[in-house]
Amino acid sequence: MTLAFISDYYRALQKQVQEQILGEKDEVILHSNTDELVEYYFAYNSLSPIEFDPNRDQTLEHKKEMRVVPARRREESYRYEGDLNFEYESIVVTFPILPNKKIQDILALQSSTYSLSGDPSVRVGHDALYLNIDIKGYGFKYDNDKVASEVNRGVDEVKTWIQRKNNDIVKENAQLEQNIRSFVEQRKAKLTEDTQRIASLVQKINIPLKQKENEVVKRIRLDPRPIVKKIKPNPKLPEEYVLDRSKVLDIISVIDNQGRQFEKTPKTYKDFEEEGLRDVILVSLNSLFEGKATGETFSNKGKTDIYLNIDKGNVLICECKIWGGQALYHETIDQLLGYLTWRHNFGIMLTFVKQKNFSKVLSDAPGIIQQHASYRSRFQQATINHFLSHHKLGQDETKDVEIHHLFYNLYTSP
């Protein structure tokens, strides 16, 4: 089977990236920094050169194993005896490499220059390449000089093979980045022109332009059910309201959409503290709830970061924090629970991680959440960055509160 060339891969990738940009929301393209958009699409799609790990040494290992020699490969006079189990000896050379999430794709592609004798046969690990060289087996046995020669030749072949691929990747990456920048700039120019043209048309027609809404927003706006469900009151008692859980999930979806926008262009928000990030989320919520989302509003024991108030019911309370480890996270849970009363059934915690190793934070989060003194039961992972848990209120330990924990990666390299 003929291998595809690295250049073929990038030609197909070029079309794929353009489709990604065309499929992005207009406001994301228009209101995001061009350099950050280019960096995002380039990092998401490009191949990274294979790099040998400078902090780990290349190693040799001598191995022995029994292999089956098929009868057809034995001398003619012995074939009637059938297959033969025979001891083989080999040298395994380990090449430590830096983890590369697309290593399998790279090794499956052909570089523009290559050896007519074929590529070296290597096994791929998470952070290493392994070259196996047989030095003794059925019908052959190398002396020390021959072993040294074969090992040196194999090592040189692997390094040359990798360098050829890296040369093509570096060349194609430069062209890809240039093409992405050109396409983003063209897309921005077109969307700007479209916006200006529609604005001019609206002025001439004198009819307000219908605003676009995503599916979650439409569901919240058009669903005839109220966001808070009315409970039939007892005689002579005021009406009370409870939160509809399906609407909570819709509201979380709106918040999560904004959080994902943060992640796409983290450099835009690198200097934002909790209040700044909260204010951006408030803008998104108020575009939907018409000014009913407020910040720094008093509830029970203090000021909440985000307080979504619907007529006749305090619907949702959110707390925003920059990640600072387990102790701070437990304090934030305490803080959120302190804002809730026995009338509240839900709370949201938004955590922004500005340090490296976001995946470790996500892997540690379930344990940290369940170790909190108020944790009761029913921990779940809704998505890779969204967890939910049930807690008791300090003021009413029989009361069950569902807390949603959302985490967003805002790390930017120095």
Image: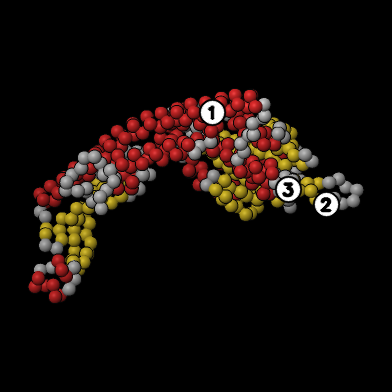
Q: Residue at x 52, y 47 (%)?
A: 384
Image coordinates for residue 95, horizontal then vertical, percent: 27, 45
Q: Residue at x 16, y 46 (%)?
A: 116
Percent from the top left, x then y, of residue 399?
A: 73, 50
Residue 114 relative to residue 367: left or right: left
Q: Residue at x 64, y 46 (%)?
A: 249
Residue at the (53%, 33%) spot, across then down: 26
| Mark 2, residue position | 232
Q: Residue furthest left?
A: 77
Residue 330 visible at all: no
Point out the frontmost of discs 2 and 1.
1
Give the percent coordinates (x, y) of residue 253.
61, 43
**Disc with the residue nearer the chain's start (1 vs 3):** 1
Crowd around label 2: few <14 · some 14–19 · many ≥20 (10 Å) = few
Q: Is 140 left or right of 365, judged from the image as shown?
A: left
Residue 225's disc is: 3
Residue on which the image places disc 1: 194
Residue closest to the eye, 386 or 127: 386
Instruction: Identify the disc placed on residue 102.
Output: none
Answer left or right for 149 relative to 267.
left
